[in-house]
Amino acid sequence: MLIGKPWAQDALSGLNCDILTHPKGFLQQAQFWKKISTKKVLLLPNSLSSAFAPRLAGKELVGMQTDGRGLLLKHGICKTPGKHEVEYDWQLAQLTAILFDKHITKIPPPRITLPISEKAQHAAHGIIKNEKLADGFVIICPMAAGLYKGTSKT
């Protein structure tokens, strides 16, 4: 099960799993998290705010010790400079796999892809046709912020 902001449902709709949208507002989110049956939660966002509601709901959090949220995490990893966010997420996946008695490779595979739903592909083709865009590709990055190796990710 994946839980996130409303845009996550569209962005991740090609995956074969349940995707839930958490409500706006801290108290509403805490109530939402209390209804989720799992005890352990893997947090991919690095923000302090992403950890508050699930922690208040009694969840054991696994995540990066960033933004002053280390005390809210049951299991955390410190970020070391010079890695891409995918590498940090892979470290979190490894830690989470260990917590569930599973195993994944030490390094990420050479290519990680996000499956795109047929509905999203159809919509994209419609936009390309309607806007009369030239052949090529479009990159959508809904969460690029900050710097990577001194260069803006935006």
Image: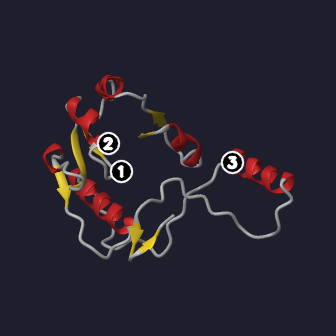
Q: Could you say whether the residue bearing mark 3 is in a helix, strand or loop?
A: helix
Amino acid carrying label 2: it is Ser
Label 3 near label 1: C-beta < 8 Å? no
User: Horizontal and vertical percent for residue 127?
Assistant: 79, 51
Amino acid carrying label 3: it is Ala
Mark earlier in primary sequence (1, 3): 1
Residue for point 40% across, 72% down: 148
Give the answer, above or below, for where 65 lies relative to 90.
Answer: above
In three-dimensional space, the C-alpha distance between marks 2 and 1, rounded to whole angstroms, equals: 7 Å
Q: Residues within 10 Å of mark 1 (few under 14, many from 20)?
A: some
Depth check, front residue: 75 or 133 = 133
In three-dimensional space, the C-alpha distance between marks 3 and 2, rounded to whole angstroms, equals: 27 Å
Amino acid carrying label 1: it is Pro
Q: Residue furthest left?
A: 71
Q: Tell me which corner region of the image, top left, top right, bottom left or bottom right, holds residue 84.
A: bottom left
The N terminus, quarter of image: top left
Write down the residue under mark 1: 45
In three-dimensional space, the C-alpha distance between marks 1 and 3, rounded to whole angstroms, equals: 24 Å
Write down the residue under mark 3: 120
Colouring? secondary structure
Q: Is residue 114 left or right of residue 108?
A: right
Q: Is residue 145 left or right of residue 33?
A: right
User: Horizontal and vertical percent for residue 144?
Assistant: 48, 59
